[in-house]
Amino acid sequence: FTDLSQITDLGQWLQDLHIADKILASGPYQGKTRTEAIRENWGDLRSLSRDVVAADGTLDKKFSTQILPGWDKAELSSLNKFFKEHGEGEDTNARANVQEKLHTGALTIKITQARFLRRSDAKKMRDCDPSVHVWIRNDHQMAWRKKPIYRTKTISNNRNPTWDVTFTKDILTGAYEARYKLPEEGWLAEVKRATMTSKQKRYIEEDRAAAMVKRFGKDGLRIKFSD
């Protein structure tokens, strides 16, 4: 989260977003540059954000069609991304929800069948009892999740089982997921959660939300100086 009032060099701000400080060809500020128009109408980015940025971080259409026309799709996308990441949301939880959506994707897996599996007990002429367990691995942390995200039903005494199932799971990007501690897994963790007070649960959620909006993850920003 960035204090927008601290960004005083609007030209550098646009340059960081890879947006040119063009002269406006139409609208109420025709003939002025974009930064001149922003400074004259709002003064700073905080005032701009409070006036034309919605709670979810998206710009009001009047900004690009009436007040400062002439932005292309790529420029508007960069602006929306900036205000979603650094805008003044209603609270930490609201900003955390926006950040989580930006770093969440849907993983869809289809499990069809298996063929010619090994027998579990050849002496008794018994086939195996197969099932499929699906785990995910966080490559940023170089670690597998302890608990599978999906399990098929077990098919008894069958070396050529057919499941034909499809499931979808929302997952976070590895680097973003690494920002906060994942909840414990297993039956013991479930017992712990069941015995928590509402106050303890609230503290955990607040810590998680705060970690979600931190820009540089759990290790902070690392700076290296060289001669």
Image: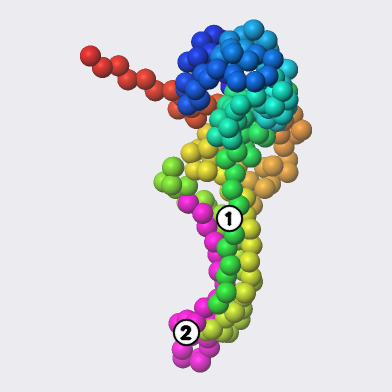
Residue at horizontal 68%, vertical 46%?
A: 191
Q: What residue would you read off at disc 2?
A: 116
Q: Is residue 120 magenta?
A: yes
Q: Nearer the viewer, residue 193 or 35?
A: 35
Q: Nearer the viewer, residue 184 or 103?
A: 103
Residue 159 rendering spot, x and y as whole percentages:
52, 84
Q: Residues within 10 Å of mark 1 (few under 14, many from 20)?
A: few
Which mark is on residue 23? none
Give the colour scheme shown. Answer: rainbow
The magenta segment is 114-137
Q: What residue would you read off at disc 1?
A: 107
Q: Can residue 140 be seen at all in this image of the molecule?
A: yes
In screen coordinates, is 181 left or right of 202? Answer: left
Residue 143 rendering spot, x and y as whole percentages:
44, 48
Q: Quadrant of residue 90?
A: top right
Q: Residues within 10 Å of mark 2 (few under 14, many from 20)?
A: few
Could you give the CA–CA distance between mark 2 and mark 1, rounded to whole angstroms? 28 Å
Up-down relation of residue 17 to residue 131 (above or below): above
Q: Which quadrant holds the N terminus? A: top right
Residue at horizontal 59%, vertical 13%?
A: 31
Q: Does dot 2 land on a helix, a strand or a loop?
A: loop
